[in-house]
Image (tube, grey):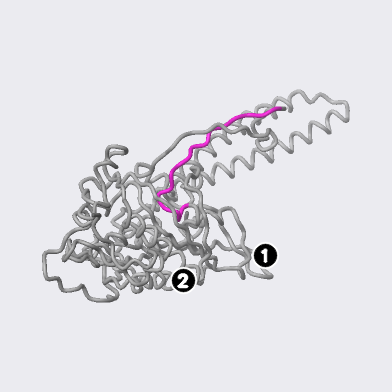
Amino acid sequence: MFDLRAIRQTPEEFDANWARRGLSPQTPEILALDETKRALQTELQELLAERNEKSKEIGKIKSQGGDAEAIMAEVASLKDKIASLEEKQKEAEEALKTKLSGIPNQLAEDVPDGPDEDHNVEVRRHGEPKALNSEPKDHVDIGEGLDMMDFATAAKMSGSRFVLLHSGLARMERALAQFFLDTHTSEHGLTEVSAPLLVNTKTMFGTGQLPKFRDDQFKTFSTDYLVDKELLEESGLSKGLMTYNRDLWLIPTSEVSLTNIVAEEIIDEETLPRRYTAFTPCFRKEAGSAGKDTRGMIRMHQFYKVEMVSVTAPDKSEEEHERMTGCAENLLKKLELPFRTIVLCSGDSGFTVRKTYDLEVWIPSQETYREISSCSNCWDFQARRMNARCRAKGEKDTKFVHTLNGSGLAVGRALVAVMENYYDPADGGVFVPDVLKPYMGGMEKITPKG
């Protein structure tokens, strides 16, 4: 999560950076826990060395026919002390890990300071909202007018924040996803991946969803697995199999699956960057967003997204961040949707990120721009949690890779934006953007069901 050696050397720099997020000084507690852990390690090493020396003495005494009973008692006593210290050391390591796992990433120097989203800074803007001759309709009214968007039936099945799409809108949702994937693979050089939707706790921890955001996640079930004894030698079993439980979680984004492709790996640096994309459903409880966007498709428990993930060498991530953001912008340009790009301020930046660009698309009914993509550079924050490293050719030492992720794009929100920006008040239909027509069988317009 963090380089403890760097924290020991310049604790004031770390605290100053975390203060930009509104946090009180964190390093005093970190360093105290680290000191406790290191002191226990030193004491344990000394006791182990003493035990080894006394064990050698026992061998010498016995080989000479002497009485080793006294020194054997000392070794037995040391064994008890060592066991106690090992337990204390384990507790100290766990306490330090728990502390570090709850602290957010360090921010880049050029991230603007500010307490909340009102202090985000616009970087650029593309396109202008169309002048409308009538009051704009929101996507819910448009979809229900088409008889192709049904929240009531979805609520009967699953509760609030779910939707059923029919006919033309269902096809357009699929068309958007296919268009995004095709553009990423053919123009942007990303590798398409079919990624797992269920992942284990270690995987969720690796990208920062756990433990901090546990309440936002859907935990599915625990499964019992049979494990060969040789894989768990420390269990003390002499033969046979044992079982353990593994929790599985529904992914909140395929960033989790794609980024963990490199977990526990040492990658040849010359093979970087690695660029992945995947189209998956995403599942979120939205536990911290009660009362926000309860109408329509803006904030759902289940939604579709095409994700981008990059893994780079440490000195290439800033360049890759700009490239990734450009890939997401390219999709909106091709759809001819007005949007703006903003850089998030310190108080609005996510837990795992060093710097984030948000792309916000124009939503006529709300007369404002709404987020449709976040492109973030996580630096080595996730890599440390996953132990993902790279090694340059001819070198022995390894370095933590840098990881980046971005929406490319959120499919549901893209559908909302197309519906509202391409709405035809003359008959209640929705024009099909030119780039989507090949995916819609040449259809020019989605019209109300007769």
Displayed quadrant of residue 140? bottom left
- Image height check: is 376 above or below 257? below
Secondary element under disc 1, as helix, strand or loop, is: loop
Nearest the viewer among 450 and 113 is 450
Residue occupying image coordinates x 55% and y 31%: 224
In the rendered image, which quarter contains the C terminus?
Answer: bottom left
Is residue 9 shown to the viewer in this render? yes
Mark nearest the camera among 2 and 1 is: 2
Mark 2 / mark 1, whichever is N-terminal: 2
Are there few (<14), some (14-19), or many (20+) residues within 10 Å of tag 2? many
Nearest the viewer among 2 and 195 is 195
- Image height check: is 228 above or below 10? above
The magenta segment: 240-256
In the image, 37: left or right of 214? right
Question: Looking at the picture, how far across and down is residue 279, in whole percent?
Answer: 45, 57
Q: Are marks 2 and 1 in contact (CB under 8 Å)?
A: no
Are there few (<14), some (14-19), or many (20+) residues within 10 Å of tag 1? few
Residue occupying image coordinates x 55% and y 61%: 400
In the image, 47: left or right of 25? right
Separation of marks 2 and 1 at Cα, in angstroms: 26 Å
Question: Looking at the picture, how far across and down is residue 63, in whole percent?
Answer: 87, 30
Q: Which mark is residue 16?
A: none
Instruction: Name the residue tied to disc 1.
Output: 396
Residue occupying image coordinates x 16% and y 60%: 137
Residue type, mark 2 in image = Glu
Is residue 354 shown to the viewer in this render? no
Residue 251 is a magenta residue: yes
- Image height check: is 147 above or below 91? below
Instruction: Name the residue tied to disc 2.
Output: 320
